[in-house]
Image: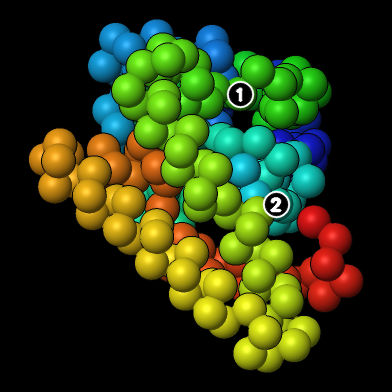
Amino acid sequence: MEYGNKSEHTRTKCIKCGDCCRKNSPALHQADLALITGKRLERKNLLLFRRGEPAMDNVMGSPVLLAGEMIKIKSATAGHVGCVFLDQQSNHCNIYGYRPMECSILECWNPEPLINCYQKNRLTRADIFPRGSAMDELISIHEEKCPVTELYSMLQQETNAPGTAREDINRLLAFDDSFRQNFQEKTGAHEEDILFYFGRPLKDLIRPLMDFMKLNPDGNA
């Protein structure tokens, strides 16, 4: 079920069926910051979606291009949208005692509380890394030099007029790769940390952006 749909059942309480957790994983909000700073949630279990990336809108039930960044709990397996913390056998949540805000307020029979806060006060990297810190400055540089929105525009141009944006796309991808490689060489950061700091490599976003473009041929996000 999507968050925006009423349940088919006339429930008044959770029956621990696991359906919500199998079909969606929660985005994090500012109220969840302590889960990260307190190391309740590790970076390996989180996925950063940058502004302009396509992502499933759990209320609308369809993919959208994000107007702002979103940090979300990872899926259980590649291509699966369920939550990595759901025990598939018992339907129990492995972090129930410190589950994110979206999980704590979700009621499948009454989705309004979640709908009302779904896109409000989402947690971002700016909430995690102090303004003016070295990491904050690096993230800002990367966002300025490698925006997902620019890649999407270039892909649209290349689709409409093959050959006109190819060099610009390759130049953007090369800078993104070089930026990440230099950061790894200088800091020794693990891949999961780099993904949390700077999101997925731009080259890995080409396919999902193209897929989104095919679903929205008029160019509307």
Q: Residues within 10 Å of mark 2 (few under 14, many from 20)?
A: many
Give the camera-side residue of 131 and 90: 131
Residue 202 position (above or below residue 146): below
In this rendering, position of residue 213 left or right of residue 196:
right
- SS type, badge 2: strand
Q: Can residue 189 be seen in this view?
A: yes
Instruction: Look at label 1 and name its amino acid.
Output: Arg
- Residue 157 rendering spot, x and y as whole percentages: 73, 76
Q: Which mark is residue 65?
A: 2
The residue labelled by disc 1 is 122
Instruction: Look at label 2 and name its amino acid.
Output: Leu
Residue 108 position (above or below residue 211): above
> Could you say which quadrant of the image residue 190 lies in?
top left
Residue 217 position (above or below residue 138): below
**Mark 1 or mark 2, which is nearer the start of the sequence?**
2
Residue 161 position (above or below residue 87): below
> What is the total number of numbered labels drawn onto the structure image?
2
Q: Which residue is drawn at 57% across and 82% down?
A: 166
In this rendering, position of residue 14 left or right of residue 10:
left
Look at the image and name its color scheme: rainbow
The answer to the question of whether label 2 and label 1 lie on touching residues, with beta carbons closer than 8 A, is no
In this rendering, position of residue 108 left or right of residue 172:
right
- Residue 204 rendering spot, x and y as whole percentages: 43, 65
Check the picture and name the quadrant holding the C terminus: bottom right
Q: Can residue 212 be seen in this view?
A: no
- Residue 16 rendering spot, x and y as whole percentages: 49, 30
Mark 2–mark 1 distance (CA, rounded to whole Å): 15 Å
